[in-house]
Image (cartoon, rainbow, N blue to C red):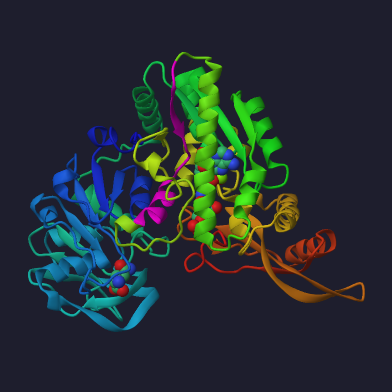
């Protein structure tokens, strides 16, 4: 399987901060420091590069529990700075003495006021230039029972006596709070102090450099004659990936859009226009809607839906690859298929490797059948694998893709299927489509589209009673969801004006047959996810 450009070549080109599982990568990238996330069980012997520093992230387990993951002790022999965050800090303390970590009396989740103090010496570099008192985000139940031997306390909060610690002589630090979340004031500055100040990383990771590397990597992987079949959805990721492929290998690249029966209203037609007219891409639209809808019949479990859709997608791509080969436009076989897989997709679906619990199987990663993961059949090329959404958008701009396409809200591969709770039927798909279309049109009309990161209408098939035109109706419930987020890892519900929501409600109950109620989902992520399933 081909590595994404972030994986193989970047380490030789840029100073790298290695993040062992979860979340911080994003913030470091904003500082133009390249960082790579690997499962916490990564052994250093198998690592093909030497990081400039290591961050051990948070995770859902408790260090003292049997079976909880532990870091390869070899990280301490690398002689590079180490920063432990939450679970990561508890891990540092636990390794020194298991009695250092205990279950707290209550879970601390949310804001806390942090008080940093200067202790003299190298330890102060962590809070260098940062105010002594700041709001931070906590999310933990365990805590340090005492200060590990050889460490200073660098910061405290009301509930955490050891909110930040630093080793007296070695460059080893721990934070009980989460600097990587936007709720933590100065969190990015803290990470900068670690990566740039303490580890000495250069801040030279830019989109232009990424672009050059990505093109070189694609040419290398595909070879001089190989052809690539690109799965495109019209979404930002696959559009950017497709344009990147076109830059890299020109006419040896083919795009396929699968109508999986759970696309939005008029979506396939629109994508065909955008991709062939605006970007000159050679696109085939395969109508497989009946095959998908038949297969989804009777399937209620979200994970089963996702896995079925992922598997079916691959079947269809393989069929298309054969057709392209048979057409023999180029005298070589189809070398690969690209996908617009992004970092958050990978984190959430492959997390069984590390300590973070699997949240959902994304059709484009966990949903792939074993024969692809095993390297048989098609090869998978994922040029955006190491990028976050806003980085993909920046790459799209660097490639000259117009703003409207670059700014499109994401739409998941499993489409409306994960926006209908429970079984998917053609009737419910139609209802979701109509309601979604009304919602999005109103959002555009109100000039709110670009203020919202993602919005859609979902169908709750449990029915409610209503009264319309003096008649009793018994219909589905439409759930409106709109969120703002920069990284899609955390999100807030969008704060609509009341009259806007009423207008949308009015149109939906009047225009969409079979619906008698509309609700607005105010759940943030976490605990909710962006999609319903
Ligand atoms: N209907 C589809 N036909 C073909 N490929 C698809 C389809 N839906 C998804 N894919 C493939 O799965 C990948 C992942 O989907 P995903 O929704 O994450 O990305 P996207 O659609 O390109 O961008 P966005 O996140 O902005 O919607 C896509 O990049 C594309 O390669
Ligand atoms: O290509 C995709 N295949 C999937 O299976 C999938 N599931 C969720 N998403 C998108 O990922 C982002 C985060 O969604 P969640 O908060 O629901 O996990 C949101 O932008 C979701 O739309 C997917 N994209
Ligand atoms: N966010 C975390 O890393 C939590 C670590 C650990 N499970 C705790 O509750 O303290
Ligand atoms: Mg999409």
The image shows residue 167, relative to residue 287, as above or below, that is below
Tag count in the figure?
Answer: 0
Tell me which residue sits at (54%, 44%) in the image. 312
- The quadrant of the picture occupied by the N terminus is top left
- Would residue 279 be found to the left or right of residue 332 on screen? right
The image shows residue 103, relative to residue 185, as above or below, that is below
Classify the position of ligand 4 by quadrant: top left, top right, bottom left or bottom right.
top right
The foreground one among 371 and 171 is: 371
The foreground one among 199 and 64 is: 64
- Would residue 499 be found to the left or right of residue 210 on screen? right
Tell me which residue sits at (58%, 57%) in the image. 418
Q: Quarter-wise, where is residue 385 in the image? A: top left
- Would residue 502 be found to the left or right of residue 460 on screen? right
Q: Is residue 172 visible?
A: yes
The magenta-colored residue range is 332-351
- The quadrant of the picture occupied by the C terminus is bottom right
| x, y percent for residue 65 | 23, 74
| x, y percent for residue 60 | 33, 68
Tell me which residue sits at (63%, 64%) in the image. 495
């Amino acid at each position: 399987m081909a590595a994404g450009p972030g994986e193989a070549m970047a380490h030789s080109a840029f100073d790298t901060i290695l993040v062992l599982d979860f979340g911080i990568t994003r913030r470091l990238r904003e500082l133009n420091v390249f960082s790579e996330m690997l499962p916490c069980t990564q052994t250093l012997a198998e690592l093909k590069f030497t990081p400039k520093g290591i961050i051990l992230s948070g995770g859902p387990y408790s260090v003292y529990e049997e079976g909880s993951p532990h870091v390869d002790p070899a990280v301490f022999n690398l002689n590079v700075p180490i920063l432990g965050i939450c679970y990561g800090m508890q891990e540092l303390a636990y390794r020194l003495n298991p009695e250092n970590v205990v279950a707290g009396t209550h879970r601390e989740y949310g804001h806390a006021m942090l008080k940093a103090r200067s202790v003299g010496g190298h330890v102060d570099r962590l809070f260098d230039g940062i105010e002594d008192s700041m709001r931070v985000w906590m999310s933990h139940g365990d805590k340090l029972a005492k200060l590990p031997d050889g460490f200073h306390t660098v910061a405290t909060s009301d509930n955490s006596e050891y909110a930040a610690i630093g080793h007296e002589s070695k460059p080893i630090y721990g934070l009980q709070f989460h600097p990587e979340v936007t709720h933590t004031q100065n969190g990015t500055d803290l990470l900068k102090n670690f990566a740039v100040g303490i580890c000495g990383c250069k801040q030279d990771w830019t989109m232009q450099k990424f672009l050059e590397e990505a093109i070189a990597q694609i040419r290398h992987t595909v070879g001089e004659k190989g052809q690539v079949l690109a799965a495109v959805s019209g979404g930002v990721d696959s559009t950017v990936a497709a344009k990147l492929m076109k830059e890299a290998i020109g006419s040896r690249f083919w795009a396929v859009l699968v109508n999986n029966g759970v696309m939005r209203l008029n979506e396939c037609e629109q994508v065909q226009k955008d991709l062939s007219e605006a970007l000159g891409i050679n696109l085939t639209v395969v109508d497989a809607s009946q095959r998908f809808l038949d297969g989804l019949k009777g399937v209620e479990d979200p994970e089963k839906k996702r896995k079925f859709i992922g598997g079916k997608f691959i079947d269809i791509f393989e069929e298309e690859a054969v057709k392209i080969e048979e057409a023999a436009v180029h005298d070589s076989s189809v070398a690969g298929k690209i996908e617009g897989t992004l970092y958050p997709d990978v984190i959430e679906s492959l997390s069984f490797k590390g300590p973070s619990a699997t949240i959902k199987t994304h059709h484009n990663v966990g949903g792939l059948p074993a024969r692809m993961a095993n390297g048989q059949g098609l090869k998978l090329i994922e040029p955006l694998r190491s990028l976050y959404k806003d980085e993909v958008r920046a790459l799209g701009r660097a490639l000259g893709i117009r703003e409207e396409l670059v700014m499109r809200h994401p739409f998941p591969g499993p489409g409306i299927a994960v926006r209908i709770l429970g079984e998917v039927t053609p009737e419910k798909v139609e209802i979701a489509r109509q309601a979604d279309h009304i919602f999005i049109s109103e959002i555009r009309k109100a000039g709110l589209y670009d203020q919202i990161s993602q919005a859609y209408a979902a169908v709750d098939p449990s029915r409610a009673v209503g009264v319309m035109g003096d008649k009793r109706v018994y219909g589905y419930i439409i759930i409106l969801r709109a969120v703002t987020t920069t990284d899609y890892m955390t999100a807030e519900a969008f704060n609509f004006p009341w009259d806007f929501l009423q207008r949308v409600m009015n149109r939906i109950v009047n225009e969409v047959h079979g619906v008698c109620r509309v609700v607005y989902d105010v759940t943030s992520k976490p605990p909710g996810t962006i999609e319903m399933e």
